[in-house]
Image (spheres, grey):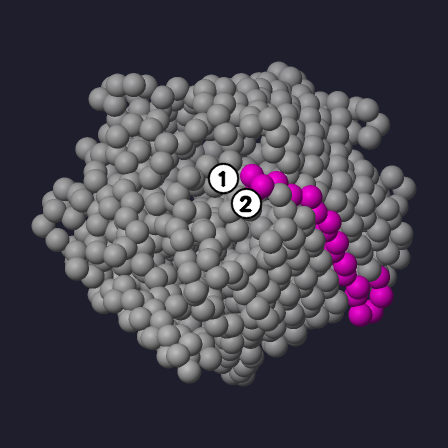
Amino acid sequence: MNNLRLLSAFLFSLALFSQQQIPTFDGDITADEWENAQQFSIDYEINPGDNSPAPHKTEAYILYSSTDLYVGFVAYADMNNLRSSIRNRDEGFQDDNVQIGIDTYGDGRYMILLGSNPEGNQIDGKLLPDNEDDYDVNFESKASKHADSYHVELKIPFNVLPFIKQDEMKWKVVFVRTTYTDDARSQSINFKLDRDRPCFICQTPTEITLKNIVSKNRVNLLPYVFGGLSGNKDTGDFSFGKLQKNAGLSGLFDLNSVTSFEFALNPDFSQVEADVSQVNANTTFALFFPERRPYFNEGNEIINSNLNTVYTRTINDPLASTKLIHQGDKQRVYWLTAYDQASPYLIAGENGSYSGEGGKAFSNILSYQRTFDQGSYIGLLSTNRAFKEGGNGHAFGVNGLLRFAKLYSLNFEINASFIKEPKKDWIDSEDKIRGKTVALDGDKKRGNAVLIELDRNTRNWNTNFNFVSYSPEYEAPLGFVTQNSIHSAEISHSYSYFPEDKEGIIQQLQINVGSEITFNYNNLRKYFDVFNNTFIQWKGNLRTGINFIHVINEEFTGFVGRNMTEISMFNGFSPSEKVNLRAFVSLSESLRYDEDDPSVGNALFVGTFNNFQLSPKLRLSPSLRYSELRSKADRSLYFKGYIGRINANYQFNQNLSFRLIGEYNDFDKAFFVQPLLKWNPNPFTIFYIGGTNGYSRIESQRNFQISDSQLYFKFQYLFDL
């Protein structure tokens, strides 16, 4: 009985102690609420500085309850010049902001970044050993402004973070502050960065200690309803079709703290915002568009492939899909299955790619990785697709990232593909590749692909060697491989300069020189160049990039262009929160990729991307890209055109916004207008209503008329059960 009383008293005192630690979640940091917190400071500027003193003082605090992690920031600033506007989620990176990076495994496999700008607008992402990935986390943020600082509080449920459950845990963390001083962008962290070590995630010496926390398994349901009308003008009057109605359900279930299961039944994978059109007037290869769909948010780092073995946009319109993700202590697994109603088909070639809309298919992606310290891993990757009406494709491979001798990183990937073509008319071509038709007529193909990349990184000097090879019949059934039948090697060497004088005109300088050479499988040299890239961070938030490429030779369908030069320049300038200007220009001698009449021409590519913050709630983002190619012999025009786009966004509050996009494509002589009203209180709940009107030019009348129109709405709500 006495033991029971002692236990009860202990549990009561523990609960009381935990309760005393929990701050009032209001965005205001007060000393009495956070007096028992673990405290940290952000002292070292790493960009553009090199561990120089941070320009502004920033304090960070950590408290936790049994179910949530509380993070507090006091960010001192010149409040009269603070950059901060009310924005959509994940747009606060361009403002002053604070973030915490959390590595729950301590092995450098990834670090989850969570933060906010001074308005409380959330920002999040996932920092990987060699790049950064988009990532959405359902957490809470609040902020407040004061005379000499702004405060941010984050409330992060433990169950949104995968981790190995233990009675006492030590998680590695990084605290980050992005700010502006004298109109110059500055980034600071809480420890000195060792630039001789290539893994940023692995360097942090800072740990937080957590005891007796509870991570309730998530049960999330995400139903949606969708409605839309589509209309077009063929030869007669414009008319709308019948109302399109759709509904579906997605869900996520945690099996434990490191394993989750997701499903999607009749998901709606439409995007809120149309992809930005790309200039494709002089290319024979398919264009790449990034993945934006939330269902593919979790676990992307496990299927990341430098050979583009996985491109989840090949799962285009699934009727049903499941996904299992396991993030264990030393191993991790990703397994996705889907029944797709319209799977796209892509065939790579030496001088161009071929694509078409495919049919119904069952798709499977399976990846396993054995993890080690410093973000290293060795993995296996398999992708499979079987069409309902015949034909299938499989790719199998081994890959890895190994860090050794402190300065070195080795990336490798070795794949084999096995293709049995369907007998369908999805691709219209009479071309042949090594005796086999491009048209889908049941051919069997086997291929392989290899990538080896070796990096050596020090504070000032960096060397990179990259080799990639695609055999003539290699295809990635669920990937994005547009060119094969090549061996390509590139070597580059760069120097980074960090001046001691922070008042000097140059804040940072990087110079890179290298060469790339490519042969086909007949040992014909297809491409050979030497290049130089220079990047300068000037004082006053001006950035300049200058690129020089001299192409010694480039071969295309038997035609060889020689001694072609390209010079390009990029400038970015943001003198204040209200103005962000970016412009580029490229002058080059370039091949005209026309199979019937290839030649060398003089190319001009110029453009600008800008943001104007007209008020804390209203932003205008115009862009323009112009491209032309003229004959080098007689200056006759091969093509010219431009794409102009404007995006106006009004933010009523953090969750509600109205956006209007207009884009004119001079190459197609068409433009569209796309209004959208959106409510988005968390990464997964969304309501929007909008439309798109497309207009095309009538040459005989030299004006535009509406050619197609869509009206649509969607409501999707996250139930966290």
Structural crowding at the residue carrying mark 2, measured as other residues with C-alpha within 10 Å and reported as few (<14), some (14–19) or many (≥20): some
Q: Mark 2 vs mark 1: which is more N-terminal?
A: 2
Q: Residue 379 lies in magenta, yes or no?
A: yes
Does 445 sit above or below residue 672? above
The answer to whether mark 2 and mark 1 are in CB contact below 8 A is: yes
**Would residue 292 be visible to someone looking at this image?**
yes
Camera-side residue of 83 and 715: 83
Residue nearest the observer in this picture, 296 or 571: 296
Above or below, 15 against 380 in this view is: below
Q: Residue at x 42, y 82 (%)?
A: 1
| Residue topped by disc 2 | 107
Q: Which residue is mark 1?
A: 202
Q: From the viewer's perspective, is residue 236 above or below residue 384?
A: below
Residue range in magenta is 373-391
The image shows residue 401, relative to residue 317, as above or below, that is above
Magenta stretch containing residue 63, yes or no?
A: no
Question: Residue 254, image x and y in percent?
Answer: 56, 70
